Amino acid sequence: MQWVLWLHVLGLPAVGLINGESIVHVVPDSAGLLVLALMAHFLRHRVVQATLVASGLLASSGLLVHFTDGLIESHFHFFVMIPLVALYQDWRPFLLSVWFVVLHHAVLGVIDPAGVYNHAAAQARPILWAVVHAVYVLGVVAVMIVHWAFSERAQAEAADHRRLLEKADRRMRESERKRLSDLIRAKDQFIASVSHELRTPLSVVLGLALELRDSGDLFTDQEHRELTGLIADQAVEVSAIVEDLLVAARAEIEQLTLLPATLDLRDEVRRVIEHLVTDAERVALVPGGVVHAVGDPIRVRQVIRNLVKNAIRHGGPNIRIHLSHSDGGAVIEVRDDGPEIPEEQRTVMFEPYATRGSINQGVDSVGLGLTISRTLACLMQGDLEYDHTSSESVFRFFLPVPDASDHVAGPAVSKTTTNDPRRWVGFEGPIVPSAR
């Protein structure tokens, strides 16, 4: 954090000079940053250091706005510095930073609106713009407080787990200790992965929304559509992650209700491909005839989406989806030309929180996709299995087919032992053609 402050001490004077400010103006304005950086370096009390560094970083934001003559884009520096100060996880420097932003926009915005805003509307109504900025700052603060509380809770739970492990070490065999240690590590990875996967799309949504708010009049209609489309795509991504988490929780407490319907699997696969946020061009549906099955349409699409996302994350560049009938049931095969999953990983790949390093990304996924998919497949009297044939990884998703009373052509015998889908665990109501 001190190095970040020192970079501002060295960089901001250069910004001022490049922007046409005189050295007589730049040096006195930047001297305060130098004093704060030196005091933070020599005073070793943690709270004092944190307060000095936080003051320096937020003062850097104010100077950047000043040196750029109130450029609206320079205000985004505040939105970077506040989360950075929050890394201290200390209320004192954090609240000091928030008050600095409020005073800077409210007081200086009224005294010298042209020095804080280069926007004509903001200069005409500085108090209104100060309130608008305050709302967004409070939004960032709320997000950071939630993340802060989540981190503290995760750290407390990790500490509890470590204490349990220490007690268990005295009475458990080596294999049992290893199993518990693996579970703790997997859940810690799960917490980190959830934080990462939620934070990434939420950051995109927040950043683009702020850009549209502050500089919307600079974009063309086409650019507006592209930015709002990106926001919508990332919101869909967040919704999918949350949906997986909710299904996992409901399945664990046996409170998951499914509604069976007769489906055209080709239509369901097309809907999944159309709503992919990224890499849709890598996924191809192999042409073929109509394949009907019985299942909950929302959950069938959720399983297909998880299998496709797993192939995008871990598989090769080419992904193909085959639809067919086999052993009296309907089969959806998601194939990719990526590396084969080792035998030792196949035994645990469908267990909760089991992940493997992605060949396309540097961060593991949440680790619930395959677990949720197999759970849903079994609840719909189907199955999910993995195979590797002809240099391709293949996930086969089995579903029962409608019987003769459903008036849909196709075999009447399910792949599983229960032939009547109306007897599925957790299902309610009659089988009807899908309206979703």
Image (cartoon, rainbow, N blue to C red):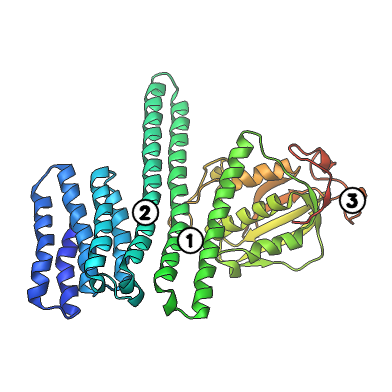
Residue linked to disc 1: 360
Q: Position of residue 359 (x, y in %)?
A: 48, 58
What residue is shown at x 70% (from left), y 57% (from top)? Answer: 333
Mark 1 Cα shell of 10 Å, populated few (<14), some (14-19), many (≥20): few
Q: Position of residue 435 (x, y in %)?
A: 78, 56
- Left or right of 234? Residue 432 is right
- Element at label 1: loop
What residue is shown at x 54% (from left), y 69% (from top)? Answer: 229
Q: Nearer the viewer, residue 397 or 128?
A: 128
Q: Amino acid at mark 2?
A: Leu
Of the numbered discs 3 and 2, the one sitting upstream in the chain is 2
Residue 138: mark:
2
Residue 406: mark:
3
Residue 336: mark:
none
- Left or right of 50? Residue 164 is right
Residue 179 in view here = yes
Q: Nearer the viewer, residue 220 or 175?
A: 220
What residue is shown at x 49% (from left), y 49% (from top)? Answer: 356
Of the numbered discs 1 and 2, the one sitting upstream in the chain is 2
Q: Nearer the viewer, mark 1 or mark 2?
A: 2
Quarter of the rendering occupied by the C terminus:
bottom right
